[in-house]
Image (cartoon, rainbow, N blue to C red):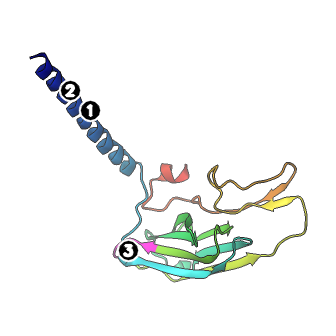
Amino acid sequence: MRQSHHRASRWLVQSFLLLSFLLAAALLLRSVEAAGARRIPAKENERRVVLGEADPGSLYAVTVSVKDPAQWPGRQSVHAAIADARGAVAEKWLHAADLDFYLTLHPRARGQASVTLSAAKGEAIPEMTFAFHRIPAGREEPAVIAAAPNDTWQTAQPVEFGQTIFGGADERPYAPAPNEDRYAAML
């Protein structure tokens, strides 16, 4: 009798824990969606553009921009993801209030650098311009150019004490896209 009571109690506790886990997962998913998690549009409305061959020993200036802002519909947005041979490096939504994306790329491996453009279902990807230029190696100065990917401690760029750091990147929105949660986009 005691053993069957123990089994029933264990089953009840396990069932409660499983139900609690499922409820927590559902609430977390709902809160992420409500916080404006960026959804990448469907593959059918996507275009990949090869920017050029990249060498891990070099830095590259990468710019993606809308060619003719006058022809940009007011509420349309396009997701741009810049990648090296190993995969995505940085991404950003382009729209009427933020028409370009720039970063300095330090490729992680030799191979093609590319940008993938995606638009929402039913929206056209506008005509775009792309720039991909190797940055010439500088003189032997105590300076470094900040280059992506470098947004985590695992990919942090080494610098020496006293070095001047030059950098500019544009992954953060100047103004959030119409389909983005404004607060989440600015964090």
Determine whether, in the image, residue 150 is placed left or right of residue 5: right
Specify the quadrant that holds the N terminus. Answer: top left
Q: Is residue 129 magenta?
A: no
Q: Which residue is mark 2?
A: 10
Most extreme residue toward the right is 140
Q: Position of residue 28 (x, y in %)?
A: 35, 43
Q: Let me know if residue 99 appears in the view.
A: no
**Kind of residue at disc 1:** Leu
**Kind of residue at disc 2:** Arg
Determine whether, in the image, residue 10 is placed left or right of residue 39: left
* Location of residue 44 by image quarter: bottom left
**Kind of residue at disc 3:** Lys
CA distance for labels 2 and 1: 11 Å
CA distance for labels 1 and 3: 38 Å
Mark 3 is surrounded, within 10 Å at the Cα level, by few (under 14), some (14 to 19) or many (20 or more) other residues, namely few
Most extreme residue toward the top is 2
Tell me: residue 120, above or below residue 127: above
Q: Let me know if residue 74 appears in the view.
A: yes
The magenta region covers 118-122
Q: Pointers 2 and 3 in contact (CB under 8 A)? A: no
Q: Residue at x 40, y 61 (%)?
A: 39
Q: Earlier in the sequence, mark 1 or mark 3?
A: 1
Q: Residue at x 49, y 77 (%)?
A: 72
Q: Position of residue 159 (x, y in %)?
A: 79, 53
Q: Which residue is mark 3?
A: 43
Q: Is residue 121 magenta?
A: yes
Q: Pointers 1 and 3 in contact (CB under 8 A)? A: no
- The circle on residue 17 is 1
